[in-house]
Image (spheres, helix red, strand yellow):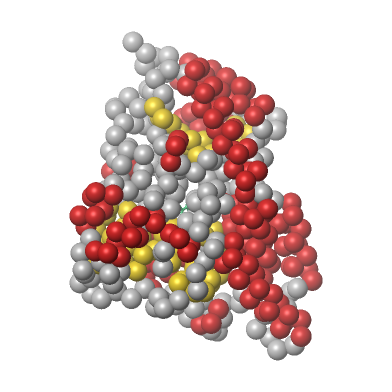
Amino acid sequence: MTKAIYLDNAATTRINDNVLRAMTEAMQRDYFNPSALYTPSVEISTEIRRIRSEICAALHAPEGELYFTSGGTESNNTALFCTRKPKGGRIIVGMGEHDSVYAPANELKAQGYDVCFAPINRDGTVDVGEFEKLLNENVSLISIMHASNETGGVNDIAALVRLAKRRSPNCIFHSDGVQATGKISVNLRTIGVDLYSISAHKIHGPKGIGALFIKKGVSVKPLLFGGGQEKGMRSGTESYPSIVGLCEAVKLNIEDKFADNYSKIAKYREIFLKKLTSEISEIQIITPIENSVPNVLTVAFKDVRGEVLLHSLEKYGIYVGIGSACSSHHESRFKGLLGLDDRHRDGIVRFSFCEENDISEIDYVVDCIKRELDVLTKFKRV
Ligand code: PLP
């Protein structure tokens, strides 16, 4: 088979070689339980503390604590279920949130909380006017994602936090930063959130590790109880190699290579978009290009199912995503929301790039899409 052209980096990324090397070394050499009392364990637990501060510094976090979790899903579940929430208090969650926020919000609704879903614009970002209408003094928790996994659209979290804290002074504001971290600059001090979720595998780190930042003074109970690791916030023997992997991925993507990667990926998307729109007619662009992470390009093709196109591109070794917008249980939530006409609404495809993609592959990818569309839409054209 020819070399794969992987264009689904918003789903997950290939682990970086340096990250893997650092993890392998940690696995083989530093296998001690960080909670044990002998010297190698104490050294590991000191190193975990150092890594915590290094990641906080990379995120420009204010005073607070970063807790390691098993990934974005656990961080988001902790934010939703474990923050202080008086019964009867209102919870506001964006309508376009990832399932790891949306499903807990529905569970809280089933438990009797007043859960409101903030409507989104056609580009997947929260409609600020509609969001404002939901605010009142009883709001206890708000969760709005930083960047959308469906469209790449970026919410102005700083503005939403300011608005929320003015109208709902007692609210805790959480943001799911899984798709934003490493893609746009994140400064937790200036955006002012109380809680922020990150995940390693979206930035060339390992799967199964992420973190939740909790600002000082914000009360959050543990989701998992047990041996009391992570200052009691997250029991379970720390996965030191994964923590090392997260740290290396953060160093690489947020500190060392951020600017280089950003311009390379943005350039790739610009050329890809130009080629796609010049070669393929009647395509609708869903991603708000000027207000998005640089790595995502979500489009809707006419008269074809995104899923069918996805599979037909596999034979060329081209892997793309359809996000969750096309899966059947998301129908009511997304398809209507993105404002597509009947002939485009099933044709959503999410291309997502990384710095390992090469501009020289674009012509081939677009030619393959064109060839497949010609076959797949032959009988639908009038
Ligand atoms: N939040 C967003 C926006 C995501 O895109 C994802 C993964 O697709 C998650 C949360 C879940 O993260 P994880 O896979 O680390 O549990």
Residue 150, image x, y percentages:
42, 43
304 is higher (above) or lower (below) than 153: above
Q: Residue furthest bottom?
A: 37
Quarter the C terminus occupies: top left
Residue at horizontal 28%, vertical 49%? 128
Residue at horizontal 43%, vertical 66%? 195
Q: In the rendered view, does 31 fall on the left or right side of 166?
A: right
253 is higher (above) or lower (below) than 138: above
In front of the other: 331 or 117: 117
Quarter location, residue 336: top left
Q: Is residue 113 visible?
A: no
Quarter location, residue 112: bottom left
Residue 44, image x, y percentages:
71, 77
Q: In the rendered view, does 110 fall on the left or right side of 62?
A: left
Q: In the rendered view, does 332 fall on the left or right side of 367?
A: left
In front of the other: 277 or 322: 277
How many numbered tags mark residues here? 0
